[in-house]
Image: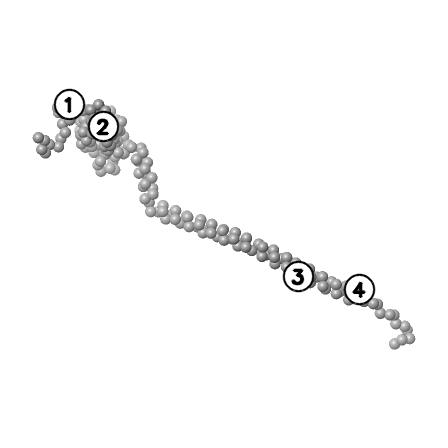
Amino acid sequence: MRHGKKTNHLSRKTAHRSALLSNMACSLIEHKRINTTLAKAKALRKYVEPLITKSKQDTTHNRRVVFRYLKNKDASSVLFRDVAPKINDRPGGYTRIIKLNNRLGDNAEMAMIELVDFNVLLTKDQSKKKKTRRRGGKKASAVASKPIETNEVIEDAEIIEESAEVPVKEEKSSEQDIKMDASKAEPESSEDINDDDKPAPPPKEEGEK
């Protein structure tokens, strides 16, 4: 019975198991994600995450410790040069395990293990969410939207007032024109009668007083 035994030996001897995990760790560091069985993915996570934590401090001692486990110069250099700067702010949890469909041959549980900070799709979504969480952006958008609404309301009100005032002004102008024409016609006719149509007085003779 396996009471209290948490280590999964993966049905291999110690040397075979360490070589397997070392090769899988190198592949994960170089390709950033690999597909394997669920049991191997869980064992690899315990094996590779302490090495990634060591890579945060680029010292000669840490490089030697990491190389002792990976046994690959290219993988260790990629870990310290490319992976370490991206995971420097993360306090742990550098890998993600995603379950896949079972394998066709023996129906084994399959999974994909990947480095969290190198998933392009998820990092884009996170950057967009961070932008929307800022408090200043909401206030700025609200302030910017208010004057636009008031301007639209003012413009609509001016258009309504103009449309309502136009026929009234035309009616007033037409009535005023009629009154002005009538007032102009009356004094002209009276003046013509008083000045032009009056009979001329007869000439006075010399003897008459």
**Contact, mark 2 vs mark 1 (Cβ under 8 Å):** no
In space, the residues marked 4 and 1 are separated at their CA atoms by 139 Å
Which one is nearer the viewer's eye here, 82 or 151? 151
In space, the residues marked 2 and 3 are separated at their CA atoms by 99 Å
Picture quadrant of residue 64: top left
Which residue is depicted at the point 23% across and 24% down?
A: 104
Q: Which residue is mark 1?
A: 16
Point out the frontmost of discs 4 and 3. 3
Which one is nearer the viewer's eye here, 29 or 178? 178
Point out the frontmost of discs 3 and 1. 3
Mark 2 vs 4, N-terminal side = 2
Q: Which residue is mark 2?
A: 102
Q: Which residue is mark 4?
A: 196
Q: Which residue is mark 3?
A: 179
The amino acid type, in three-letter code, at marker 2 is Asn
Query: What secondary structure is found at the residue carrying circle 1?
Result: helix
Which one is nearer the viewer's eye here, 115 or 73? 115
